[in-house]
Amino acid sequence: MTITTVTPVTQDERGSQDEPQLLSQPSGCAPTPPHPRPTGRDRYTIGEVAEHTGLSAHTLRWYERIGLMPHVDRTHTGQRRFTNRDLDWLHLVSKLRLTGMPVADMVRYAELVREGDATFAEREQLLAAHREDVLERITELQSTLLVLDYKINIYADARRGAEGA
C-alpha cells in the first residue's frame, strides 16, 4: 500500500477561551502525522481526521462552525465525511497556525478562497502582510537566540574553569 503524508499542527493554540486546544505533537520542520493518509481513499470520519492531524474532534467541529473549514460532506445519518481536499486544507491551516496567524485572519482567508479567483489580490495582500509579521518575529527570535548562546557560553566556560581547578 502506498501512503502520502500531511504535516499536522504541532503547537498549542493560543486565543480566545472558546478556542479549543490542539493535541500535543512533536515539533520539527516536517513532523510525521500520527497515521499517514492511505492513497485511493477519500472519505474519513471525524475520528480518523483527528487521529491523522492531531487536532481534536472538538477543534475540527469548531473550525467548521467558525467558517474556517469549507463545507464538510455528511452521510445520510448526518456524520461528517472529510475528503482528501479537506485534509489538504487542514494542512494549510496547520501551517498558518504555526506562523501565529490570528484565527480571524485565517477565517477571512477561507472566506476569500470560497469567493473565488476574483479575490487573488486580497489573498496575496493578506498573506504578504502576515509574512512580514513572521519575518519580524524570526528576527526577534534570532536576537533572543544570541542572548541565550552568550549565557550558555558563560556557564560552559565557568564549568570548564571549575573542572580544571
Image (cartoon, grey):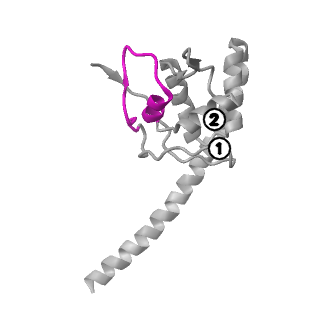
Q: Are marks 2 and 1 in contact (CB under 8 Å)?
A: yes
Residue 7 visible (yes or no): no
Query: Nearest the camera: 158 or 21?
Result: 21
Count of marks placed on residues:
2
Magenta run includes residue 2: no
Q: Quadrant of the N terminus?
A: top left
Q: Is residue 12 left or right of residue 41?
A: right
In the picture shown, does residue 20 fall above or below 3?
A: below
Query: Nearest the camera: 61 or 79?
Result: 79
Residue type at tag 1 = Glu
Q: Which residue is mark 1?
A: 19
The numbered mark, 2 or 1, whose residue comes first in the sequence reads 1
Residue type at tag 2 = Trp
Q: Residues within 10 Å of mark 1 (few under 14, many from 20)?
A: some
Q: Which residue is mark 2?
A: 62
Q: Secondary structure at mark 2?
A: helix
- At 40% across and 38% down in the image, what residue appears? 31
Q: Name the spot of residue 48 as percent of width and height, x first.
A: 44, 29
- At 47% across and 29% down in the image, what residue appears? 49
Looking at this view, name the residue that lies furthest to the front: 77
How far is mark 2 from mark 1, CA to CA? 8 Å
Residue 62 visible (yes or no): yes
Q: Secondary structure at mark 1?
A: loop
Which span of residues is magenta-colored? 31-53
Q: Name the spot of residue 152 as percent of width and height, x first.
A: 43, 68
Q: Quadrant of the C terminus?
A: bottom left
Q: Name the spot of residue 13 as percent of width and height, x first.
A: 58, 46
Query: Nearest the camera: 138 or 86?
Result: 86
Q: Name the spot of residue 23 as percent of width and height, x first.
A: 49, 44
Query: Nearest the camera: 78 or 131?
Result: 78
